[in-house]
Image: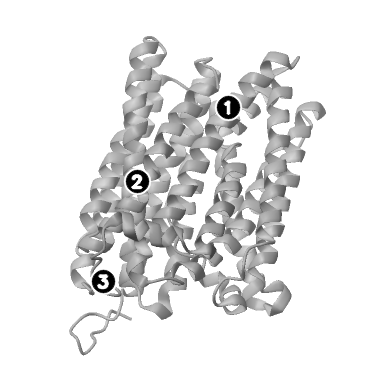
Amino acid sequence: MGAGFTSSGFTSGFSWGQIARLGLVQTALGAVVVLITSTINRVMVVELALPALVPGALLGLHYAVQMLRPRWGYGSDRHGRRTPWIVGGMAALCLGGFGAACATALAETQLAAGMGLAVLAFLLVGMGAGAAGTSLLVLLAGGVAEARRGAAATIVWVMMIAGFAVTAPLAGHFLDPFSGARLMAVSGTVSLLAFAVACLAVSGVEGRITAPAEGGPQKAPFSAVLRKVLAEPAARRFTVFIFVSMLAYSAQELILEPYAGLAFAMTPGATTKLAGLQHGGVLAGMLAVAAVTAGIGGPVLGSLRLWTVAGCLGSAVALLAIAMGATLGPDFPMRAAVFALGFSNGVYAVAAIGSMMGLAGAGGPAERGTRMGVWGAAQGVAFGAGGFLGTLAVDLARLVATEPAQAYAAVFAAEAGLFVLAALIALRLAPAPGGNALARTACFSLGPELEAR
């Protein structure tokens, strides 16, 4: 199953082994990111007693930097060499991840110095995640034979989720009993292992299969290519949907663990495991819907739009249940509700990412990197805005709420409303190219939007 050669002398595509190796880059990326978005966020709010706006603003910086994703995608299209972007991006990401842990530990005794270091660390995280994720996407898009692209996307996406799901509970185990030094040790170990795995994964892969850029090298200037992509109605509508749905998703990202700590007295290790449970639910939701569409399909169960709407509405219901948990007390099944939220997110992800895969090739192939970069930028802006607005809303609600948990519950309810709005927008999306054929193979075609959140 190795790569073959065409008459032009170029290989026909990555082998399955090479695809799996590239998937390890996403596993490594996810392992570093999950500690930043879950554990470090919770420590700042609960252990350091900082306003929730502080980690929200820091994550906002991380996502703001990812506005450069279209430019990175364009540069990869134009120059062809993706491996240096991946390795360099992973180096920045891992250094930033460890720096964020150091900054959190430092802030316990020297707040100003810790926050200064945190700003630099989160900027590095944003640059690294965007550069590595976008470049890996372009490498896969150009190096995987068309018949294998769906399966390749699934392998790499699932391996990224595995990085989230495996790292969070393992890190939670080693974080208890909590201390700043222990946080630095765990983060440093994860970062070193992640960088080593990523470097070994990409070593020599691009050199074995150097295909010409699809549609020829990118000659037009970046501004002209970007305008062309943004002028496409389907791409523009899909960008709006990505923004709203990701805004709904990301607003809970920074407040779920602090909420669990405040409302249910969970330890840092327990809430970190809770984040792992959520990511496990995402994976289960993706695979469950993929199995249904692959096994049954048809005009109803094979509809990407149906599953997109169902996933958004399911996420809204789960968020409302979590919001009610604050009033129901310690008997509330928090773990089940968090898993249901992750599961619904996975359902929505299968359909949305499947649609993205179909739309990615709708325009000229030479703009694939720029087009995917635009969607990645929309995702980044939504995550940055969601994290910031979610934490700001909590801080504002706490000014009027009698109990802190009630403030969090009000924000969860507002996020549920955003998911309902996303479902309404999804109803207006045009069917993705490939329609039911894409849905029927969803188990092996979760799409090429592989950047970590």
Disc tally is 3
Q: Earlier in the sequence, mark 1 or mark 2?
A: 2
| Viewer-side label of 1, 2 | 2
Badge 3 element:
loop
Residue 383 percent across, percent down from the top left: 51, 41
Q: Nearer the viewer, residue 230 or 431?
A: 230
Q: Residue at x 55, y 43 (%)?
A: 276
Image quadrant in which you'd find residue 100: top left
Residue type at mark 2? Leu
Q: Name the residue at 71% across, 78% down.
A: 299
Please identify the residue farthest to the bottom as the structure is shown. Answer: 7
Query: Which residue is identified by label 3?
Result: 213
Question: In the rendered view of the protein, which quadrant contains the N terminus?
Answer: bottom left
Mark closest to the chain's N terminus, 3 or 2: 2
Q: Position of residue 342 (x, y in %)?
A: 63, 48
Q: Residue at x 49, y 37 (%)?
A: 384
Q: Residues within 10 Å of mark 2 (few under 14, many from 20)?
A: some
What residue did someone put label 2 on? 68
Residue 64, picture quadrant: top left
Kind of residue at badge 3: Ala
Please give the residue where the numbered disc 1 appears in the rendered image. Answer: 391
Can residue 58 be spotted in the picture?
yes
Badge 1 amino acid:
Thr
Q: Residues within 10 Å of mark 1 (few under 14, many from 20)?
A: many
Identify the mark nearer the N-term, 1 or 3: 3
Question: Where residue 370 appears, x then y in whole percent?
Answer: 36, 59
Tag 1 secondary structure: helix
Q: Nearer the viewer, mark 1 or mark 3?
A: 3
Question: Vertically, is 317 above or below 102?
Answer: below
